[in-house]
Amino acid sequence: MLRPYDLASGALSGMTDREQLLEELRPVSFAVAYRMLGSVSEAEDVVQEALLRVHRTLEDGEQIESPRAFVTTVTTRLSINELRSARARRERYVGQWLPEPLITDGEDDPARHAEMADSLSLAMLVLLESLSPEQRAVLLLHDVFDYDHAQIAAILGKGEANVRQLASRARRHVQQDRPRFQTTREQREELAQRFFAAVEQGDLAGLEALLASEVKLTADGGGKVPALGRTLQGRGRVARAIVGYLTKLAPLMPEISLRPAPVNGAPGAVYIDGEGRLLGVIALEIGDGQIHSVSSVVNPDKLAHLGPVGDYVSLLRSAR
């Protein structure tokens, strides 16, 4: 737990302590901003501004009793403003919109427990898009980051009764559209292995056996890489679409490899070209022994934060 700081007083060791504090607050701010916005680039802009405001407040000689609460408040308010303008841009987006994916691995895995993992999944972030910015903030702050209604009211500058109403509406909407699935980490990983094995083998029957009857397939190319124009639903349609796409890519398979990777706290994989550059990310939503959604991000603009990005369009042309 972070203790009160008054770094401007010089009681601690000057800039070194301040820089350390800002680095401690950076992941706190990013965790909120990314879940609010579903965009790494937009979240990083918000984080930068939030940390700058922390720095300026300390520079002005003000004491911050709880740096974590302070940066959460600033980040949430900035994210709400950013989300309003981002939604106007997303209405003009070409094709299906998906969040910018994160590869969540190692000790810094932000999906350490069920609520954190659920709030980070691509499917959940898409569902949160249907909430108002304030509903989204209240739901995340209460259910994921453990703030009570009184604290959230202070963060948003609203009455506590209003916050409770926003929370109730948001939770009702989310629970209606996203039933909870019972599954263990081991079950998810085992099912993901079988799914990607069936994908690489072009095993239509094997794929269908793993998919839920209402499974959805969504692909985000952003108009820059060929992708599905709309979400497909249904076991047979999704399985045939996946196998059909792989058939078209067959001539390229020596140059493209599929590597398992945790995506937004869930099982997934990345497509890599012959030079180790990223071509796409796939995330699975798994529960009750079945795959309920498959999300594919191939828009290069949404992959750049993960490393070097390959030229998928040129590869597809060569396949033809």
Image: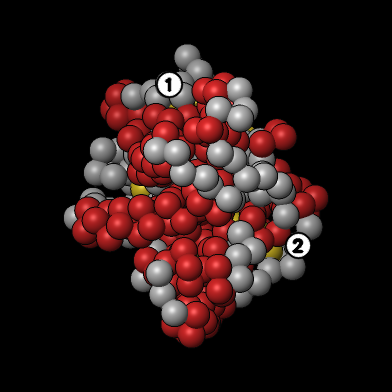
> How is the structure coloured here?
secondary structure
Q: Quadrant of residue 52?
A: top left
What is the number of the mark on residue 226? Answer: none
Q: Quadrant of the C terminus?
A: top left
Element carrying mark 1: loop
Amino acid carrying label 2: it is Thr
Q: Residue 209 placed where, x, y %? A: 66, 60
Q: For this view, does 88 lie left or right of residue 284?
A: left
Name the residue: 26% across, 38% down. Answer: 224
Q: What's the distance in space between the residues labelled 2 and 1, CA to CA?
A: 34 Å
What is the number of the mark on residue 183? Answer: 2
Q: Residue 249 placed where, x, y %? A: 43, 33
For disc 1, the marked residue is 308
Name the residue: 48% across, 68% down. Answer: 154
Q: Residues within 10 Å of mark 1 (few under 14, many from 20)?
A: few
Q: Above or below — where is 82 with respect to 181?
A: above
Q: Are marks 2 and 1 in contact (CB under 8 Å)?
A: no
Q: Residues within 10 Å of mark 2 (few under 14, many from 20)?
A: few
Q: Nearer the viewer, residue 116 or 8?
A: 8
Q: Nearer the viewer, residue 155 or 78?
A: 155
Element carrying mark 2: loop
Q: For this view, does 146 lie left or right of residue 231?
A: right
Name the residue: 64% across, 54% down. Answer: 117
Q: Above or below — where is 110 with respect to 182?
A: above
Name the residue: 70% across, 33% down. Answer: 106
Q: Nearer the viewer, residue 62 or 235?
A: 62
Sequence-wise, the earlier of marks 2 and 1 is 2
Is residue 113 among the parts visible in the rendering?
yes
Extreme residue in the top direction: 275
Is residue 209 among the parts visible in the rendering?
no
Q: Nearer the viewer, residue 26 or 124?
A: 26
